[in-house]
Image (spheres, rainbow, N blue to C red):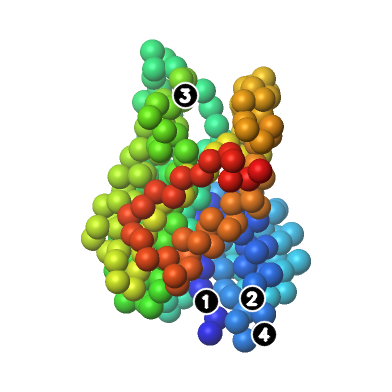
């Protein structure tokens, strides 16, 4: 039976890698349908649509900082799909430094809108129905920093947002998860994606040098972890699955 996927932040490098994977595992009558949200640039999704023959890929645009646009996006998802099997929440603004003493409340609000409030506003409509779907699964992209005892310095906006998103994931899992529907978080280590476009290259090189494997991971390397959380065998709910560099050696 074909499966329906909803991917918020569908133009991200991780999402594109996962859509390619969906195409690889969807054959014959198991052809999947994917709704991939994007904010501004859908070039990657257009290119993928031409390559992927085993996936019906629908791109939907929405500015996640606009609550009305998020509501319209949610309605479009519900109109397109009579049910959702898998919900993946991957949106994020490009990385930017922020010192605590230079707190920019507008920047933090924008980050919260894109990651936290989009999740809350979409999931409050989708999750009650997903709760009734056998083996439905949701994955929220978090960060290794919410699993570590202490996050790095100068990342106030990012760290605050990810901790808030962790709380939202757990609240959703407590209310809707369990039984047929499991809701979990995924916390990868640093990945080589366009999210890092504003990061000081010296910081990236320092992370490579400090990593036990001597590099940062590629987005396609976390595909098995997403698979694990989407699997019908996944029997945990409200969990933050954290990664270690050693896992990719």
Where in the figure is residue 90, as x and y percent of width and height? Answer: 50, 50
Circle on res. 111: none
Label pair 2/4, CB-CB below 8 angstroms: no
Task: Give whichever of discs 3 and 2 has the lower sequence position.
Answer: 2
Task: Give whichever of discs 3 and 4 has the lower sequence position.
Answer: 4
| Mark 4: secondary structure | helix
Image position of 214 (left or right of 184): right
Q: Which residue is mark 1?
A: 3
Give the answer, above or below, for where 145 lies relative to 49. Answer: above
Disc 2 to disc 1, C-alpha distance? 9 Å
Let me know if residue 188 appears in the view: yes
Q: Which residue is mark 4?
A: 28
Q: Which residue is mark 3?
A: 152
Let me know if residue 76 appears in the view: no
Label pair 2/1, CB-CB below 8 angstroms: yes
Nearer to us in this view, 134 or 66? 134
Task: Give whichever of discs 1 and 3 has the lower sequence position.
Answer: 1
Q: Which residue is mark 2?
A: 26
Task: Give whichever of discs 4 and 1 has the lower sequence position.
Answer: 1
Disc 3 to disc 2, C-alpha distance? 40 Å
Where in the figure is residue 220, as x and y percent of width and height? Answer: 65, 52
Disc 4 to disc 1, C-alpha distance? 12 Å
Determine which quarter of the picture holds residue 165. Answer: top left
Where in the figure is residue 3, as x and y percent of width and height? Answer: 52, 76
Determine which quarter of the picture holds residue 18. Answer: bottom right
Give the answer, above or below, for where 30 lies relative to 20. Answer: below
């Amino acid at each position: 039976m074909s499966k329906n996927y909803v991917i918020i932040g569908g133009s991200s490098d991780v999402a594109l890698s996962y859509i390619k994977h969906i195409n690889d595992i969807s054959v014959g009558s198991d052809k999947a349908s994917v709704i991939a949200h994007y904010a501004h640039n859908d070039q990657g999704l257009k290119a993928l649509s031409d390559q992927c023959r085993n996936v019906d890929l629908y791109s939907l645009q929405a500015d996640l900082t606009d609550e009305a646009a998020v509501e319209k996006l949610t309605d479009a998802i519900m109109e397109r799909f009579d049910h959702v099997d898998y919900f993946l929440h991957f949106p994020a603004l490009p990385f930017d430094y922020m010192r605590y003493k230079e707190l920019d409340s507008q920047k933090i609000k924008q980050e919260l809108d894109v990651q936290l409030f989009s999740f809350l506003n979409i999931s409050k409509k989708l999750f009650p129905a997903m709760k009734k779907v056998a083996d439905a699964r949701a994955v929220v992209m978090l960060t290794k920093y919410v699993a570590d005892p202490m996050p790095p310095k100068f990342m106030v906006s990012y760290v605050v947002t990810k901790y808030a998103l962790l709380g939202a994931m757990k609240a959703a899992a407590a209310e809707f998860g369990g039984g047929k529907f499991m809701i979990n978080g995924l916390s990868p280590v640093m990945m080589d994606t366009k999210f890092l476009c504003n990061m000081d290259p010296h910081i990236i090189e320092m992370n490579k040098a400090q990593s036990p494997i001597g590099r940062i991971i590629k987005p396609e390397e976390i595909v098995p972890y997403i698979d694990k959380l989407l699997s019908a065998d996944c029997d945990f709910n409200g969990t933050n699955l954290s990664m270690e560099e050693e896992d990719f050696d």
